[in-house]
Amino acid sequence: MKNKNKELLEFFSRTIEEVFSMEEFKKKLESGKQLKIKYGVDVTAPTLHIGHAVNLWMLRAMQDMGHKIQFLIGDFTTQIGDPTGKSKTRPMISKEEIDSNTETFINSVKSVLRFDDPNLIEIRRNSEWYDKIGVAEFLKLLSLVTHSKLISRDMFKKRIKESQDIYMHEMLYPVLQGYDSVMLESDLTIVGTDQLFNEMLGRIYQEKFGQSPQVVITTKLTPGIDGKEKQSKSIGNYIGLAHSPKDKFGRAMSIPDNLIIPYLEVYTTVPLDEIKILKKNLSKDPMSAKKYLAEKIVERYHGSEVASQERKWFEDTFSSKNVPDDIKVIEDSSLATVFDAMLLYFKNEKTNSDIRRLFSQNAVSQNGNKITDIKTSVFDGDLIKVGKRDWFKVKK
């Protein structure tokens, strides 16, 4: 067991940002009891990407050691909306939309977590307790935390500084998320750094209720495939769990060279010693390193055989034999979408309507992936093919 715990900690070290606290975590692992790990999600947006999966793979490792994941659907709190990182109040969404998003979310999570053994996972909803809680009980809950504590949250301080409104339901969100940990009696939770305040409040509440406080682990955050903001569906700079192997490979190939090593460390299981060697030789052949990264990302979700096939397809498609030597480069730092780039490429040759029609006719490919959405984001280094004869590369 000690060796397994050591291996687990080594695996976690690749993606851990902070632990509160490591000493407590080691004691819980050494206790020999089955730990309960809280994995709480608000299902405002059901699209998951490999950034979300960092935490999922850590949870999967805990499952493989016999520990139980408490998959908590925040169906009650989703109706409120977590104000994390938001300068404006989030709109509330309907119960019907929450139910639909939940189903999509669970199907995506199944690509990593084990659902074959009820002893290793249970699905809960926080409406189980919040639909039943009375006013008197809720007021008692509020009496256990101070206003100064809640207002110390970074985004609240930012709003106050900018004279932005803070609504009471937003201020109470951390209380609700924190109390979830009490109801689940969780031993551990693994979250992004943006959820640290809420989960540390969970520790406080657990202690108030006489429970052993949960260990809180936060994980590293990397930029999206555009090398700028974190991965987001709204921006389009992400590699989705639901993306096909071909899409995953193609999107990984669009990242800037400076992200190859961080992506290998965080999003693959390539040994760190091997990554160090790759890092030393990166400047000599970044393209080979990037193809290796893309292959390893696909391999993690779809297996080595599929990953190998996708690499071969990419190399065959984009070899010097198939890509024109005199390929045109469209250079504009303000380009946001493939549609914008095509407007420049076909300047004075095709109308906006003509270009829209090319998308609807499945005539447009981005790094080998067919695209039909005119709002598809474009990134530096993207290779765009239109029909059989038109090729161009994007430089931003």
Image: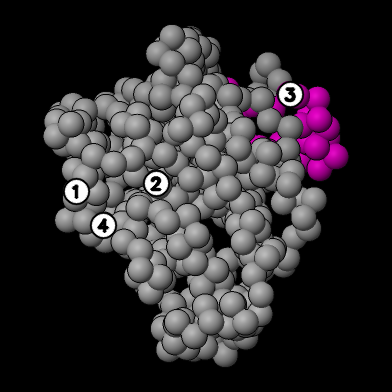
Secondary element at tag 4: strand
Residue 365, by quadrant, is: top right
Secondary element at tag 1: helix
Q: Is residue 358 magenta?
A: yes
Q: Are marks 3 and 2 in contact (CB under 8 Å)?
A: no
Q: Position of residue 46 (x, y in %)?
A: 64, 45
Mark 1 nearby-residue class (10 Å; few <14, some 14–19, many ≥20): some
Secondary element at tag 3: loop
- Distance from Cα at disc 2 to Cα at disc 1: 15 Å
Amino acid carrying mark 2 in the image? Lys
Q: Earlier in the sequence, mark 3 or mark 4?
A: 4
Q: Earlier in the sequence, mark 3 or mark 2?
A: 2
Disc sitting over residue 268 in the figure: none
Q: Earlier in the sequence, mark 2 or mark 4?
A: 4
Depth check, mark 1 against mark 4: the one in front is 1
Amino acid carrying mark 3 in the image? Ala
31, 301: nearer the viewer: 31
Visible in this render: residue 237? no
Residue 30 left/right relative to 339: left
Q: What residue range appears in magenta?
A: 341-368
- Name the residue beneath numbered marker 1: 26
Residue at x-position 44% and y-position 41%: 69
